[in-house]
């Protein structure tokens, strides 16, 4: 048996999350059905790199699977995408060693939450959170710096069966960019890169940043909330549709962050 790593993207609005669930449409279920068809083996199982909530999208999610057939990248991807529904597309498949694990071998995950901050309601790209009042991005960015490092993120975790609440955040920032030359307003981007994330963690962090901005709180309160480990002190979970998994990475996270910084400075 040979192990392969599959990279794919999807629009999350019409899925009940990424992981397979009984009687629910999920990304894992759709991928598994398509791969079983191509490998002519109904026992082929894909292992996802991680679980994404209902409504969350992905630019580069990954999964691995084992098969005894020889896979040629171009023809396999072409056939796989012909079977997959329109809201999923695979774009890379690589042969890996049998010790590789899509979830356990991952070095980092990069999430982005996108907010449309404008007086003008959106006609296109309605998936993003829409806020009319101008946001103080500088305050939000100062607050999010407090989460960088190794911390217990219990204050930003919804109820789940995950016993470990300690995560390491390598990079976090809040930036803005103009929506359009003709439209007054900005897209506010919240980027967080870490080794792992708890259930609803990014949505809770985003909600807390918006709470700090709205209530004119000191950015330092983010440290107090983090230290408290009390979910009741943090902000609410924002809606999932503005959240995207940008990448699941297997290289050194420092190298990836250098690339991001270079692009930002261009």
Image (tube, rainbow, N blue to C red):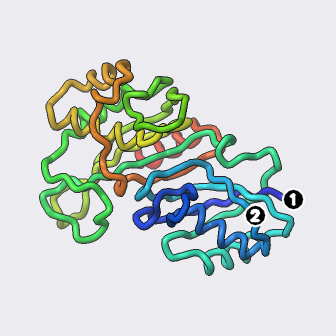
Q: Which residue, as the protein is rendered here, is positioned at the far front?
A: 23
Q: In this view, does 174 lie to the left or right of 150?
A: left
Q: In this view, does 229 lie above or below 39?
A: above
Labelled disc at residue 1: 1
65 or 257: nearer the eye? 65
Say whether residue 57 is left or right of residue 218. right
Who is closer to the viewer here, 134 or 209? 209
The residue that appears at 52% across and 37% down in the rendered structure is: 161
The residue to which callout 2 is attached is 44
Q: How far apart are marks 2 and 1 (CA)?
A: 11 Å
Disc 2 element: loop
**Front-most of residues 256 and 13:** 13
**Residue 221 quadrant:** top left
Q: Where is residue 85 in the image (x, y as percent from the top left)?
A: 54, 76
Look at discs 2 and 1 and give the one toward the viewer. 2
Determine the secondary structure under disc 1. loop
Query: In the visual, does 212 lie left or right of 27?
Result: left
The foreground one among 30 and 4 is 30
- Point 65% across, 71% down: residue: 33
Q: How crowded is mark 1: few (under 14 residues within 10 Å), some or many (20 or more)?
A: few
Q: Who comes first in sequence, dot 2 or dot 1?
A: 1
Q: Decide: few, some or many residues near mark 2? Use Cα within 10 Å; few <14, some 14-19, many ≥20.
A: some
User: With respect to residue 172, does 53 lie above or below?
Assistant: below
Compared to residue 89, the image places residue 185 above or below, namely above
Q: Residue at x 47, y 23 (%)?
A: 151
């Amino acid at each position: 048996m040979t192990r392969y790593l599959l990279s794919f993207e999807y629009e999350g609005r019409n899925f009940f999350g990424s992981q397979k669930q009984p009687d629910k449409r999920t990304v894992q279920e759709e991928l598994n059905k398509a791969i079983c068809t191509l490998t002519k083996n109904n026992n082929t199982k894909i292992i996802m790199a991680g679980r994404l909530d209902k409504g969350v999208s992905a630019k580069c999610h990954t999964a691995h699977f084992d098969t005894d057939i020889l896979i040629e990248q171009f023809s396999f991807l072409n056939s796989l995408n012909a079977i997959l529904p329109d809201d999923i597309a695979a774009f890379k498949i690589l042969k890996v060693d049998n010790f590789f694990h899509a979830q356990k071998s991952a070095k980092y995950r990069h999430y982005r939450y996108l907010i449309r901050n404008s007086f003008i309601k959106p006609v296109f790209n309605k998936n993003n959170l829409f806020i009319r009042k101008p946001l103080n991005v500088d305050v939000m960015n100062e607050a999010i710096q407090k989460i960088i490092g190794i911390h217990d993120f219990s204050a930003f975790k919804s109820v789940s069966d995950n016993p470990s609440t300690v995560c390491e955040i390598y990079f976090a920032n809040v930036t803005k960019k103009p929506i359009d030359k003709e439209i007054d307003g900005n897209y506010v981007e919240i980027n967080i890169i870490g080794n792992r994330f708890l259930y609803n963690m990014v949505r809770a962090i985003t909600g807390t940043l918006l709470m700090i901005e709205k209530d004119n709180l000191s950015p330092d309160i983010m440290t107090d909330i983090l230290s408290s480990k009390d979910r009741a002190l943090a902000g609410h979970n924002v809606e999932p549709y503005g959240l995207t998994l940008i990448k699941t990475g297997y290289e050194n996270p420092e190298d990836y962050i250098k690339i991001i910084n270079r692009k930002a400075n261009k």
